[in-house]
């Protein structure tokens, strides 16, 4: 296995990365340094203990899509192929082949669990990204595709990776779509996206952590959920979460007799 690890400015010199707390940034560097030749790390919790990282740091890296997490605790650096290129003569394939088989790779070099667009299944063994893309294009008979190895850009008709436009169809960024997927109320998507664009990457990560917890808030439990536009505009993720209130008579609690109970009883007896 190669012993040197690199990080690309294309990844770490972005607002999305720099807006994170320094503890989360440090965790990313340590995970990247300890990854195998395919970008997998088997013991992220041990790394966190060694450097004094908190649980929210790794959650933030997942939410902001700097790493991909699997159910058994294994993680993979999403932009591994952007950060590093391992020569074939020193490359050792990951032992987490089952995880690797679930991944797709996009022409910009980033891993994904989503096969949408022009993502290609990650093959076993060592591979050249540009060669992989060219072979995939030939299989599909797309002779009009032009691939450049320097920019790693792929154009298919009107589709361009990095800046996506498919005809005149409106597409929202992946992070907003993830928010829309977990938010319980789907109204005025366009207006919600306008507000989404106004907030920082750190705010967006905080929202992704807040929404699953806020589903237990008293108002949300009782159906009083704000429109997504107002949730973002009013920064509701910063409000306290109030546990559901107990209703009278719930959980075996009986209402006490009123003060006129004895008078009513006397009148009945008369």
Image (cartoon, grey):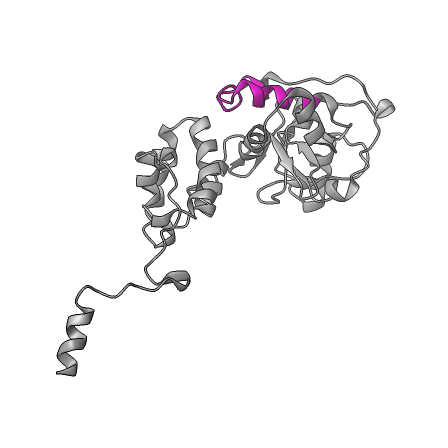
* Quadrant occupied by the N terminus: top right
Quadrant of the rendered image containing residue 228: top left
In the rendered structure, the answer to whether residue 14 lies left or right of residue 33 reads left
Residue situated in front as seen by the camera: 104 or 148: 104
- The spot of residue 126 in percent (x, y) is 80, 32
Residue at 72% in and 39% down? 122
Residue farthest toward the bottom in the current orientation of the protein: 270
- The spot of residue 4 in percent (x, y) is 77, 16
User: Secondary structure of the magenta portion, mostly?
Assistant: helix
Q: Is residue 186 visible?
A: no
Magenta span covers which residues?
A: 11-32
Residue at 57% in and 23% down? 24
Quadrant of the rendered image containing residue 180: top left
Residue at 60% in and 30% down? 58
Residue 127, compared with residue 15, is above or below; it is: below
In the rendered structure, the answer to whether residue 249 lies left or right of residue 156 reads left
Q: Is residue 109 visible?
A: yes
Residue situated in front as seen by the camera: 184 or 56: 56
- The spot of residue 49 in percent (x, y) is 67, 25
Number of residue marks: 0
Residue 21, compared with residue 67, is above or below; it is: above
- The spot of residue 36 in percent (x, y) is 77, 28
In the rendered structure, the answer to whether residue 226 lies left or right of residue 147 reads left
């Amino acid at each position: 296995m190669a012993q040197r690890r690199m990080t690309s400015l294309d990844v770490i010199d972005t607002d999305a990365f720099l807006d994170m707390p320094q503890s989360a940034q440090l965790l990313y560097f340590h995970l990247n340094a300890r990854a195998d030749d395919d970008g997998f790390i088997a013991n992220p919790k041990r790394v966190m203990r060694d450097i004094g990282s908190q649980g929210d740091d790794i959650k933030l890296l997942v939410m902001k899509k700097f790493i991909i997490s699997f159910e058994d605790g294994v993680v993979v650096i999403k932009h591994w192929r952007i950060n590093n290129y391992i020569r074939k003569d020193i490359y050792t394939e990951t032992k987490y082949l089952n995880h690797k088989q679930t991944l797709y790779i996009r022409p910009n070099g980033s891993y994904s669990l989503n096969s949408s667009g022009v993502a290609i299944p990650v093959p076993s063994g060592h591979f050249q990204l540009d060669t992989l893309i060219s072979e995939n294009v030939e299989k599909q008979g797309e002779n009009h595709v032009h691939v450049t190895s320097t920019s790693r850009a792929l154009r298919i008709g009107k589709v361009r990776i990095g800046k996506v436009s498919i005809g005149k169809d409106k597409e929202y960024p992946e992070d907003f779509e993830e928010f829309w997927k977990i938010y319980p109320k789907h109204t005025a998507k366009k207006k919600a996206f306008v507000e989404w664009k106004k907030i920082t990457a750190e705010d967006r990560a905080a929202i992704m952590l807040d929404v699953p917890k806020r589903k237990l808030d008293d108002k949300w439990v009782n159906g009083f959920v704000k429109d997504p536009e107002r949730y973002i505009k009013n920064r509701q993720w910063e409000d306290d979460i109030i546990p559901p209130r107990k209703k009278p008579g719930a959980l075996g609690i009986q209402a006490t007799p009123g003060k006129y109970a004895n008078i009513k009883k006397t009148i009945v007896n008369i």
